Amino acid sequence: MAPAFYAGAMSLTSTTGRRAGSTVASWGSATIPVFALVAVMWVVEAADAVLPGSFDVWGIQPRSEEGLVGIVLAPILHVGFAHLIANTVAFLVLGCAIAITTRRFWRVTIGVALLSGLGVWMFAASGTVTVGASGLVYGYATFLVAWGIFTRRLAAIVIAVAVGLVYGSLVFGVLPGQPGISWQGHLFGSIAGIVMAWWLSRRRPRRGISRY
C-alpha cells in the first residue's frame, strides 16, 4: 500500500508543479505588451534627451489639426525622466493587473488613449501641449475598479478593492488648480476607463444557463 500511496503523492505534486509553472508562464506572456510599451516610452525619452529639438511638440494641442496626432503619441512622450519615472511604476502595476486578469490590455489601452486624448483635444486650454502616460494610468485604475463592479467576479472585485485602497488618492488629480498638471487628461482618462470596462464587460462571453 505504501508504494502505491507514494506514487500517487508524487503524481499529485508533479501535476501541481506543472500547473503552477503553466500559470507563471501564462502571466509572463500576458504582461509582455505592458513591459514592451514601457520600454518604448524609455527609448523615446532617451532619444528626446540626446537629439536636437523636442519630441514634446507632438503632444496633444487642443483644437488644432496638428494636435490630433498627439492623441496617439502623447502617452509615450514625457517632460523629462522625472515625469516618466513618476508614471512608470503605476503603469506597470495597473497594466499588468489588466493583462493578467482580463487579457484585454491592448483593447483597454487603445480605448483609453483615444477617448482620453480626444477629451483633452476638445476641452483643454488653448496654447497648451499635453504629454504623458498619466491619462492611461488613471484609465487603468478606474477600469479595474469598474471591471470588478460590472463583472462581479471575486478576483476582479478583490483587485478593484486593492486598487481603490492603494490608488484612491488619484482622485485628487482630476481636480483643476495644479500648475503644469493636465487635470483634463486625468479626468478623461478616468472616464475612459469606466467606459471601456462597461463596454468590454458587455462583450464578455456569458456562461450558459440551463433550465430544468
Image (spheres, rainbow, N blue to C red):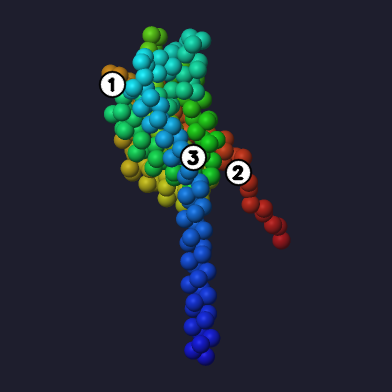
Between marks 2 and 3, how big is the CA–CA gap?
A: 21 Å
- Tell which circle, 1 or 2, labels the residue nearer the N-terminal end: 1
**Is 212 placed left or right of 18 in the picture?**
right
Badge 3: residue crowd in 10 Å (few <14, some 14–19, many ≥20): some
Residue under numbered circle 1: 178
> Outermost residue, right direction?
212
Residue 44 seen: yes
Quarter occupied by the C terminus:
bottom right
Please say if the residues under marks 1 and 2 sit with CB atoms less than 8 Å apart. no
Which quadrant of the structure image shows residue 95? top left
Which residue type carries mark 2?
Arg
- Tell which circle, 1 or 3, labels the residue nearer the N-terminal end: 3
Who is closer to the viewer here, 97 or 39? 39
> Outermost residue, front direction?
51
x%, y% of residue 157? Answer: 45, 48
Q: Which mark is residue 55?
A: none
Which residue type carries mark 1?
Gln
Residue under numbered circle 3: 33
Residue under numbered circle 2: 204
